[in-house]
Amino acid sequence: MIVNNLPAPTWRWLRMNAAEVDALPEYKEYKYEVTCPEGVSRSEKAAFDKDCRTGLGEEAKELFKASGVKVVQFSVASGKEVAEPIRLGYKYEDKAADVSGTEIVAEEGSSVTCVMTFS
């Protein structure tokens, strides 16, 4: 299976455009730190669905969908501008096999910033 097949060549700074894996390891659902400002609604959706895209590609999405991992959705209503950013903090252990689902929805005419920190 080819994962993380990026739509634009990134070799210059990442030294990769995609990776090939035989199978994903056993993984657990990861809970991350969240700061959700006023004006942003937060809800949980059932596992990955047909409308949820991942950066890993369609094959990996099907594996996540079968896993039952929930997707946390942050959304901003149409015409609303949110000044403070949504902050998501991911702190992974060495060689952790964790998965999480996050969806950011900014409806027409709205504005929001999302800062994701990975460590």
Image (tube, rainbow, N blue to C red):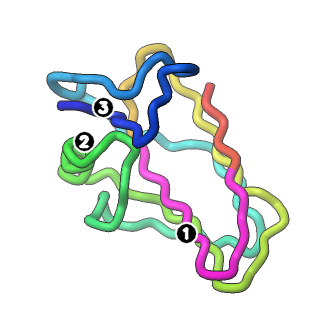
Q: Residue furthest right?
A: 83
Residue 5 picture location, percent across and down: 34, 36
Q: Quadrant of residue 89?
A: top right
Query: How packed is label 2: few (under 14 Cα within 10 Å), some, or many (20 or more)?
Result: some
| Image quadrant in which the N terminus is located | top left
**Depth-wise, is mark 1 or mark 3 nearer the camera?**
1
Examine the structure image and report whether residue 13 is included in the region drawn in magenta: no
Q: Residue furthest bottom?
A: 79
Residue drawn at point x = 68 percent, y = 53 percent? 114
In the image, which disc is placed on residue 27? 3
In the image, which disc is placed on residue 64? none
Query: How packed is label 1: few (under 14 Cα within 10 Å), some, or many (20 or more)?
Result: some
In three-dimensional space, the C-alpha distance between marks 1 and 3, rounded to whole angstroms, equals 26 Å
Residue 57 picture location, percent across and down: 29, 44
Q: Give, as a three-letter code, the residue at label 3.
A: Tyr
**Secondary structure at numbered mark 1:** strand
For this rendering, which residue is in front, 20 or 73?
A: 20
Mark positioned earlier in the residue sequence (1 or 3)? 3
Which residue corresponds to mark 2? 60
Residue 79 picture location, percent across and down: 71, 85
Mark positioned earlier in the residue sequence (2 or 1)? 2
Residue 80 picture location, percent across and down: 74, 81
**Secondary structure at numbered mark 3:** loop
In the image, which disc is placed on residue 105? 1
**Depth-wise, is mark 2 or mark 3 nearer the camera?**
2
Report the magenta residues as a range: 100-114
